[in-house]
Image: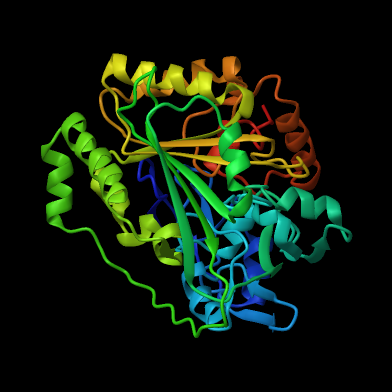
Amino acid sequence: MKKVTSWGRNKFIKTNFLEPETKEELRILIKKQKSFIPYGNGRSYGDVCLNRKNLISTKKLNKIIYYDKKKGEIEVESGLLVSDLLPIILGDNFFLPVTSGTKFVTIGGMVANNIHGKNIKNNYFSDYIISLKVFNVQGSLIHCSKKKNNNLFNLTVGGIGLTGVIYSIRFKLKKISSSKLEKKNIFFNKLNNLDNIENFNSNFDYSVTWLDSFSSQENIKGIHFFTKHIKKKNEKIIFKVKKKKVNLFHRYLFKLFNNFYLYRFVNYFFYLSHLINLKKSTDLENFFYVQDKYIDWNKIYGKKGMIEFHILVPKKLIIEFLKDFFFFCRTHKIFSNLIVLKRLKYKKKYINFGGDGVSFSADFSINSKFNLIKKFFINKQKKYSYNFYYAKDSIISKKNLIGDKQFFLFKNKIKKINKKIKINSILSDRIGVTKWKK
């Protein structure tokens, strides 16, 4: 038995931690276990990757199976970390077409949660997947794609690990000529709409919006970040992975100071540092992987951990939601360490977090006011018609999904493919995707 948690460190469990090293070992474990969930690197914030009986880790299944530099295609085992892949592909002037905010995730986890990035166009990883090899609940290895065995493919992408264990992923890479990015920052004190930003960003490849946690209902303050790849003759890109850890100073700083003063400083410093930075370019590390500056930054939130509320709000409702949210924060003196917006456009081919809207994410430490925050996000869901992102969730229940046609479609399809409820997580049981037997 091993003590395991996810990135939010808000729930610890003791479970059997199984680590197959070969394809055949994986097949045997799948056939043998009566209840399990696949486990990558545990970077999901909530309990989507936790099972109280067995976790089947893919971390040792981390090889590159196929790499075509002419076509810009690669196939890798699902346990390969992005941090291990980047030095290889960047050396050949390739980059991930979509990447999460940390490079310490597995490629399999990116598929299971259908991660979305800062891309202005085609901003889901699913847009670039060519095919998958998936061990189903019977232990059979199934090849699937958008054309072949497409039902399994469509359920596995964003399927939060419930269709089987992803063995390998073949996907497209993005050709780049430099590790440098041209940047443009737009500072604002009053966010009224996103239309003008959408018109502006047509000249860029990526965008993300940071919001000051101390904004008011009337004055929503923040920064729009825009970048695009600099085009020049191919440079030799050398990418070194740094693994700097938080120290005792960071931990005591967060422990000694209350949320107001510490978070006020963090927000003010972030805004000011970008205001005085006049450089017109940045690099991949500083734009895409800011949170990797410290590989274990989640520990600064203390023993109770943290939670991220990550939701997709319809574009037409986002400004009204933000005003409501900042009014709530000011009223109850609740502040977040990080609030980020991303514009997402999606055709709803897959289940998890699909749709056309604005991704809103906010981090909170779990403290005496946590229940107030939880009630706010649950009570406002119906008013603003938003979806919770399962990879980050720790709070929703079946009640929050009543009337969600997309969710019930997913649940019914999982029932057919996972009949004996062999694969299940704490989250899938909590929201009723797998816990349907009386």
Locate residue 378, reporting x and y percent: 50, 20
Residue 319 % position (x, y) = 52, 23
Q: Residue at x 17, y 51 (%)?
A: 250
Give the quarter of the image for residue 147. bottom right
The location of residue 39, given as percent across then percent down, is 53, 58
Q: Residue at x 22, y 58 (%)?
A: 246
Q: Is residue 421 above or below residue 433?
A: below
Q: Quadrant of the C terminus?
A: top right
Which percent across, then down, holds residue 248?
A: 13, 55
Give me the residue at 48% from left, 72% from top.
Answer: 179
- In front here: 94 or 60? 94
Q: Nearer the viewer, residue 348 or 54?
A: 348
Asked whether, in this view, residue 268 is left or right of residue 379, the answer is left
Q: Nearer the viewer, residue 297 or 356?
A: 356
Q: Quadrant of the N terminus?
A: bottom left
Residue 141 lies in quadrant: bottom right
Q: Residue at x 59, y 50 (%)?
A: 116
Tell me if residue 389 can be seen: no
Is residue 265 toward the left or the right of residue 24 in the image? left
Residue 69 in the image: above or below residue 272:
below
| 284 sits to left or right of 343 | left
Asked if residue 205 shows in the view, the reply is yes
